[in-house]
Image: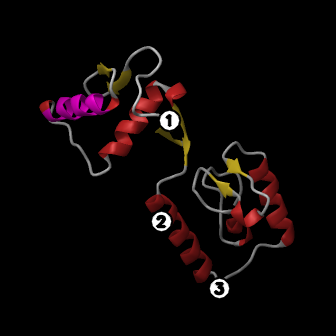
Amino acid sequence: MFLNQIKNNTRVPVGGYWIYREAETSTTLQHPYLHELEKLAKKHRKVNNLPIGSDWESQFELNVCSNQPDECEESDPPLLTKAQSLAKALTKWALSGFKVATQEDMEHRLSICESCDQWRPKSNLLLSRCKACGCSGSKLFLKTSSCPLGKWI
């Protein structure tokens, strides 16, 4: 469940073109300059009566990255996604009476996280984080928390 971001949006990519594929019209658009490709993609969607949502830039970037993964790198979930995830986890935890996971449960959860490709360890557990949901290692302590990928409850 990674998100991607383009490494360098000011250069022409390997192969000479940035690529955008519009699944709804089975159209592939290409351009050597990313900002021009974005204009073409927006115009194509408008001409074909396809919506352009408030998160258009993110959707466009994900599309381009899915077509050219070598030009992209992993990024954190958007701040809004992380904030929503945190609010949901803290609300659930508060409703439980602020129950904390047992040491055994926490160690079990941590061992699962450490073997996951979404886990980004740091020297301090509280600074470590999950790239799938953006949560820090502190989530492991909350009795009511669960893995967004369903690996632990």
Task: Give yes or no for contact between labels 3 and 2 (Cβ–Cβ under 8 Å).
Answer: no
| Local crowd size for mark 1, using a 10 Å CA cut-off: few (<14), some (14–19), many (≥20) | some
Is 138 on the left-hand or right-hand side of 31? right
* Image x and y of residue 33, in percent: 32, 26
Question: Where, by quadrant of the figure, is residue 152 drawn?
Answer: bottom right
Q: Earlier in the sequence, mark 2 or mark 1?
A: 1
Q: Residue furthest right?
A: 104
> Tell me, what colour scheme is on the image?
secondary structure
**Residue 36 coordinates in the image, percent (x, y):** 26, 29
Q: Nearer the viewer, residue 35 or 20?
A: 35
- In three-dimensional space, the C-alpha distance between marks 1 and 3, rounded to whole angstroms, equals 44 Å
Identify the residue under disc 3: 97
At label 1, the amino acid type is Lys
Residue drawn at (73%, 45%) of the image: 116
Identify the residue position indicated by label 2 in the image. Answer: 84
Q: Which residues are magenta?
A: 35-46
